[in-house]
Image (tube, rainbow, N blue to C red):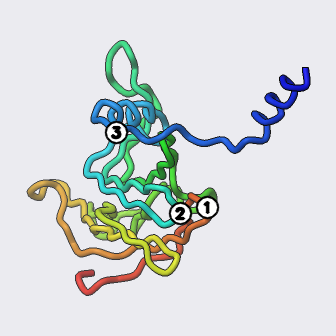
C-alpha cells in the first residue's frame, strides 16, 4: 500500500513534459493537422526560429482559422482568413504564441484596420525572426492589397515587429521601421 501511495504521489508532483517533437515528415504533417481549429488550420509561407527559452516560434503568412467539414472538405461556418499568425511549439504541442489582451490578429498586427487609400489595405507577413536582447524581432514584409492590379498585392517594404517574451508567450511591443519602409 505504501509503494502504491508513493507511486501515485510521485505522478502528481512530477513535472508534465510534452512528448518530443516529430522527427519525420509524416509526424510533422500530423502535428500541424491536429491544429485544424479556430486558432490555426492552414497557412502559406512558413519560417521558424528556436529561442533561448527552448521554444520554437513558427511564423506564417496568410492563415486560415476554422474547422474542416469531414464530409465536404470545406471549412465549416465561422472560418476566416487573417494576414499572419505566430505559433509556439514546445515538444509536440503547438499553440498561439501571442499573449491575451494584445491586438486581435494573433501575430504581427496589421498597419491599418481600415483601407489606407481607396481599395488598398496594408498587412504584414512574418518572414523571419531573430532573438536579441530579450526580444523576438520578426521581420515583417509589408503587403499592400491592390485589387485588380497584377497579383492583387504589392510588396511595399518591411518593418520589424518587436515582441517581448513572457514565458513561452509573446507580448507585442511595437513596430520598428526599416529603410525600406
Q: Which residue lies furthest to the bottom in this view?
A: 179
State which tag comes first along the sequence, 3 or 1: 3
Q: Name the image quarter holding residue 2.
A: top right
The residue labelled by disc 1 is 167
Residue at the extreme right of the image, as rendered? 2
Q: Which of 11 and 128 is in front in this view?
A: 11
Q: Residue at x 24, y 60 (%)?
A: 145
**33 lies left or right of 174:** left
Rendered position, 135 above or below 12 = below
Q: In which quarter of the image is the N terminus?
A: top right
Mark nearest the camera among 2 and 1 is 2
Q: Which residue is labeled 2 in the image?
A: 53
CB of mark 2 within 8 Å of CB of mark 1?
A: yes
Please tell me in which quadrant of the rendered image residue 150 appears.
bottom left
Q: Name the residue tied to disc 3.
A: 23
Which residue is more in the foreground, 168 or 152? 168
Q: How far is disc 2 from disc 1 in space, using C-alphas?
A: 8 Å
Q: Which residue sits furthest front?
A: 3
Q: Is mark 3 on a helix, strand or loop?
A: loop
Front position in the image: 84 or 7? 7
Foreground pick, 115 / 170: 170
Q: What element carries label 1?
A: loop
Which residue shows up at 43% across the image and 32% down it? 36
Q: Are marks 3 and 1 in contact (CB under 8 Å)?
A: no
| Count of number-bearing discs | 3
- For marks 3 and 2, the one nearer the N-term is 3
> Is 22 left or right of 53, judged from the image as shown?
left
Quarter of the rendering occupied by the C terminus: bottom left
Distance between the alpha carbons at the discs numbered 3 and 1: 25 Å
- 4 to 142, vertically: above or below: above
Pointer 2 or 1: first along the chain: 2
Amino acid at each position: 500500500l505504501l509503494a502504491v501511495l508513493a507511486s501515485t504521489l510521485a505522478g502528481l508532483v512530477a513535472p508534465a513534459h510534452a512528448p518530443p517533437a516529430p522527427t519525420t515528415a509524416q509526424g510533422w504533417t500530423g502535428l500541424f493537422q491536429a491544429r485544424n481549429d479556430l486558432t490555426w488550420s492552414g497557412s502559406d509561407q512558413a519560417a521558424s526560429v528556436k529561442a533561448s527559452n527552448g521554444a520554437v516560434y513558427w511564423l506564417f503568412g496568410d492563415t486560415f482559422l476554422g474547422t474542416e467539414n469531414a464530409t465536404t472538405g470545406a471549412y465549416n461556418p465561422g472560418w476566416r482568413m487573417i494576414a499572419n499568425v505566430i505559433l509556439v511549439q514546445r515538444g509536440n504541442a503547438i499553440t498561439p504564441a501571442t499573449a491575451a489582451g494584445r491586438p486581435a490578429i494573433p501575430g504581427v498586427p496589421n498597419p491599418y484596420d481600415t483601407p489606407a487609400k481607396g481599395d488598398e489595405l496594408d498587412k504584414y507577413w512574418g518572414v523571419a525572426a531573430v532573438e536579441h536582447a530579450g526580444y523576438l524581432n520578426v521581420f515583417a514584409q509589408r503587403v499592400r492589397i491592390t485589387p485588380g492590379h497584377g497579383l492583387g498585392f504589392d510588396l511595399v517594404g518591411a518593418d520589424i515587429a518587436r515582441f517581448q517574451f513572457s514565458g513561452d508567450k509573446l507580448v507585442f511591443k511595437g513596430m520598428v521601421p526599416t529603410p525600406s519602409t
